[in-house]
Image (cartoon, grey):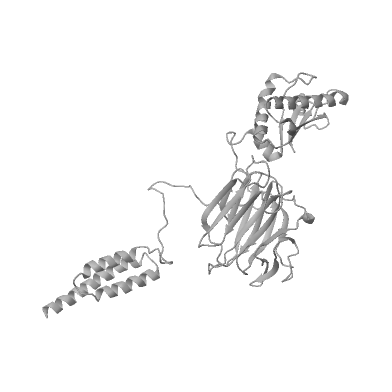
Amino acid sequence: MNKKLFAMAAILLLTCVADASAQGIFGRIKRRAQATIENRVGNIVDRTVDGAVDGTIDEVRNATRNDGDDPEATTPEATTEEPGVTTTAGAVKSDFVRGSVIMFEDNMVNEQVGEFPSKWDLVRGNAEIATINGEKCIALVDGDGWITPLVKGGIKNYLGDVFTVEYDMLFDDRPKDGAPSIELDIMNENERQDNELFTVYYGMSYDKQTIDCDYVRPTEEGYSHREGHSSARDVCVINDGRWHHFALSFNKRAIKFYVDGKRVINVPNAKAGAGWFTLWSGHKDDRPTYVKNVVVAKGAVELYGRTETDMSAVERSIQETGKFVTNNILFKTGKADLLPESMEEIKKIADYMKKNPSVRFEVQGHTDNQGSDAVNDPLSQKRAEAVVKALESLGVDGFNLRAVGKGSHEPVAPNTTEEGRAKNRRVEFIKK
């Protein structure tokens, strides 16, 4: 009898202890974990008194741990912050701004369901107009669907060096059995698909998606060999059968890509020369990728400044404007003889050209309007030839250089003042 009373009292005490422990746990974990703890505590109090305390402690400790096999279990976000320290590394950026001039826009409102979208051209595969919840969109229904917008009659040089591209996209891979790869491909005017200037791509498998960007570096000779790569791993969930907004900004050299307003790709120094773009989806089954609300605009997110140590003045100017203009190459008055102090500037230009041995330049000589065209035209030609000869002496391949005398026919400032005439006496290096 005494042993029975003792056992009952112990069980009652154990129940209270377990319940108190469980109440602390319930406030920290999800409902599924709560049910698990309740079941475990119920089982524990049915055990014999011998070893019950040890068993309860073990069960409660295990219940509070995050079981990696439980898809609903969660853990607090990891942090590197110390008390009193504010960290900014990895902060999410939402600085996207659409370009100010719309070049192409398609909301599919007036399209006919089942037909190919009228504002687009087919690269390969197949696409058609479909509806989702009564709203029209483009369905890339082929396993290798590739489309490009019809802009200005189908020309392929409409993007330029400052532009934005936006679109909404939907794909449902909640069963995790048919995930596609999707690309936004930016091409040079003279390149075909698969030879992208740069491409942003993302696979739809796994619970979270990784966004990748392959791009051409400014020092590369062509427009299709991708040696640059940037990747943002596990940054978004975009395979959940919901619409998500994607946006690209390119400004002269900077690639920025956004998912639902958050920047995930930030490439500071890529090669310019964009002409046209395509959207591609390669999926494994017959479930389409859907696209709507496509907008292409001229303009981009403001360019973040780079210092002289990041990029030479010659490189920056050629990359941003396609030419380098200098008033620091000087000649004897009325002659084509270079002054010694001109060589410092010519060496900077030679350094760039030797780093880019396949790029061709037109070397233009310009004069002010002092004197007749009969004098200035041949003088400017001889001065351009003198610069070419100096570059060749520094190791630049003369095959890539063409001397052209412009005389006084293309002034950049009024010739009515000495300051204006000094600006007009210049040498320009035009990338061809």
**Residue 43, above or below 331:** below
Q: Is residue 344 left or right of residue 78?
A: right
In the rendered image, residue 180, in percent from the top left (x then y), is placed at: 59, 63
Residue 162 visible in the current orientation: yes
Q: Is residue 260 visible?
A: no
Residue 89 percent location from the top left of the image: 48, 47
Q: Is residue 388 left or right of residue 30?
A: right
Task: Please report the residue visible at 61 percent of the width from the left and 64 percent of the height from the top.
Answer: 283
Relative to residue 418, is residue 249 depicted above or below? below
Between 285 and 294, the one lying in front of the other is 285
Quadrant housing residue 139: bottom right
Give the residue drawn at x 87%, y 26%. 373
Question: Quick one: which residue is furthest to the left in this view?
Answer: 2
Relative image position of residue 289 (x, y in whole percent): 63, 65
Q: Is residue 220 above or below residue 129?
A: above
Q: Quadrant of the N terminus?
A: bottom left
Extreme-bottom residue of the structure? 1
Compare residues 143 and 267 and report the one nearer the observer: 143
Q: Is residue 235 left or right of residue 410?
A: left
Quarter of the image for the C terminus: give it. top right
Q: How many marks?
A: 0
Above or below, 199 relative to 391: below
